[in-house]
Amino acid sequence: MAGKKKSVRKIFRSYDYYDYNLLAVIVLLTAFGLVILYSTSCYTAQIVQKDDMYFLKRQGLFAVAAIIMMILVSLVDYHKLMYLAFVIYAMALVLMIAVKYSPLGATINGARRWLKIPGTGMTIQPSEIAKIAVIIFISLLIVKMGRRYRGVKPVILTMAFGIVQAGITYYCTDNLSTAIIIFMITAAIVFVAHPKTVPFLVLIGIGVLFIVAFILYVPHLAAGDSFRIQRVLVWLNPEQYSDSGGYQIMQALYALGSGGLFGKGLGNSTQKLGSLPEAQNDMIFSIVCEELGVFGGLLLLLLFGFLLYRLFFIAQNAPDLFGSLMVTGIFSHVALQVILNICVVCNVIPTTGVTLPFVSYGGTSLFFLMAEMAIALSVSHQIKFKQDAV
């Protein structure tokens, strides 16, 4: 009788368990993002849309729907994604091509990167689907190879699928930063899965040397050669281009510098009052630092750090290689976007247009980010099931 009760308790605990630490930090980041989004966008929303809560309402609806979706999907066994991996990968390619060649492609702020959803007035960004497609498909590909995943050929094959997705993203949406992120996610998964690390470290070193050489050579190029060359020149000397390409980054730096240790107070930013263009998007971290100071910026970074710690823990303790590699890809995606966004705001790297996860405005980005979190939660659920079943 005692053994039967113990068995029932084990079954209940295995299905009742949830990684509440990860869930809590996701909800905290989302709530923090909504508060900062309203503070950042209320002035612009009132001027342009005649409703100071315009951006908050839209993002809030997406956030609620995405969190509910995340919780429900996280209860599904992540191994079922094995059957959908290629479909999701192919769908991402098709949708990307549709952006460029179909009438559903939408141009916003001069960039054609969205697809219109007929009859709804809403748009989606297929490049966000491409990120999660690469995470799932590359992980499955490596798992299918098993012990054969050694040497150069398997690496070339897996990297090729990532490069194809990144290349189509760049070609069809002209979004270099997202293409780089997709490539780096693939590289991170391959790096973790492959038994040898020295060749990858050599390639990283060569890549760093190439980037340094390029940066040293850029000042000798004409400013009008390319808008990407222009961005690098602006990055190297934003004051010289403050009346054109350097205006946004200069205003972001003013916001960072004026916040001090504890900021001007929530809602008291001056840079958001028309000085900093599109402040609610990729430059939102500068408003965080202006209103909440260094303290607020560090608090946000600590939340991201805890999120990444939980993802790292799940990847290390996943019950199988498929789950571990997928969470590794999710970890690298979130880490890359946080690092790139904050480096841009601080003018450590040229402007990329990469948004800050959970904080920047963007329904598609938030929705698919929550889908990734659902996968991580599903993997963590299996970890507890495995421990209780022993």
Image: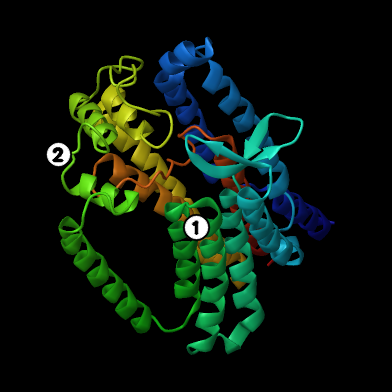
Up-down: is 371 above or below 38? below
- Mark 2 burial class by Cα count in 10 Å: few <14, some 14-19, many 20+: some
Q: Is residue 283 left or right of residue 175?
A: left
* Disc number placed over residue 240 in the picture, else none: 2
Q: Nearer the viewer, residue 276 or 102?
A: 102
Distance, label 1 to label 2, CA atoms, is: 29 Å
**Quadrant position of residue 121:** top right
Q: Percent position (x, y) of residue 40?
A: 40, 22
The residue that appears at 55% across and 42% down in the rendered structure is: 365
Q: Identify which amino acid the numbered label 1 is placed on.
A: Tyr
Q: Secondary structure at mark 2?
A: loop
Residue under the image location 21 percent in, 60 percent down? 215
Instruction: Name the residue beneath numbered marker 1.
Output: 170
Image point (78%, 58%), residue name:
7
Please provide percent x and percent y for residue 384. 63, 57
Hey, what amino acid is under mark 2?
A: Gln
